[in-house]
Amino acid sequence: MAGTSYRCRALVLKKTKLGESDLVLTFLKDDGSRLSAVAKGARKPANPFATRLDLFAVDDLLLATGRNLDVVCEARLTSSFRGISTQVDRYAAASPVLEALSRTTHEDLGIPRLFDMSVSALSMMESVSVEQAPAITAAFLLKLFAMLGLKPNLTECVSCGRAVDPAAVSGDVPFSYLEGGLLCSVCAPAHQTIRLPAVTVSWMHALMMSPFDAVAGMNVDLSVSFAVLQVCHSWLRENMGTNLRSLNYLLSCGLF
């Protein structure tokens, strides 16, 4: 039986069918924590939840605490991001944002500014040209790594601390997923590394450090965006044991 009630603002990350007409929803709350709750009857066409709890929706929620899952009592839609959910290419670019949030956040462990950053990324992804959407995805993932305390070091050697400037290199630079970023030429032989194009690393740093509106104005080439996304994909897998199916799809779908 439902208990005390509370309100929060939340972004819908995931929907799972429950029974004949209910949904279990995963949200990112406005304090940066994850929430799972059930919406009773949400799959019935006449139920108001049917449109207010779509993926990418931002809602003001009234919830009641439950024994296992909290229960959605009311949902007032504040943002729908219909420009994302109705266009297959934008949807493909934005889906890794939702999946990354659902896989890396935790219940009762808030991350300040994460909610605002996520909504800002989706808002920009809805308004930019389709060709720039993957750059927003890449920038979001890099910023997410930083918020989680897993930011790759892109400006100095992770072993000795010597400054490394990829912009001054015309070829490749040594990079280690295991060690956490760039290595200088002196330290690299002692570690397990790969070679990344210096231009890719320079773009990674620029995307990580720039607000989304600045990223939108950079006119990032699609080849650059996908090169950075590939590094992000490997970074998630190697450092968090997380394989995003939506990012796999984005990298291979051929929509861009």
Image (cartoon, rainbow, N blue to C red):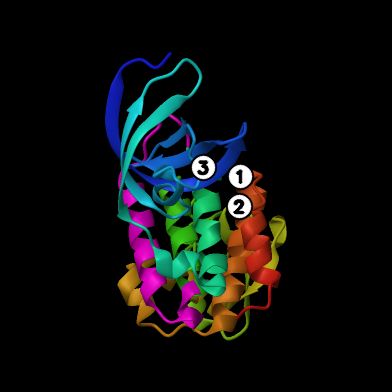
| Mark-to-mark CA distance, 1 and 3 | 37 Å
- Is residue 132 placed above or below 12 in the rendered structure? below
Disc 2 target residue = 236
Confirm whether the magenta stretch covers residue 122. Answer: yes
**Which residue lies most toward the front here?**
46
Residue nearer the viewer, 37 or 29: 37
Q: Which residues are magenta?
A: 106-133
Quadrant in the picture for the N terminus = top left
Q: Amino acid at mark 2?
A: Leu
Name the residue rendered at 35%, 82% in the picture: 217
How many labels were placed on the picture? 3
| Mark-to-mark CA distance, 2 and 3 | 37 Å
Name the residue rendered at 36%, 69% in the picture: 124
Callout 2 touching callout 3 (CB < 8 Å): no
Name the residue rendered at 35%, 50% in the picture: 58
- Mark linked to residue 44: 3
Q: Amino acid at mark 1?
A: Met
Where is residue 64? Give x, y as percent. 35, 23
Callout 1 touching callout 2 (CB < 8 Å): yes
Q: Amino acid at mark 3?
A: Lys
Disc 1 target residue = 240
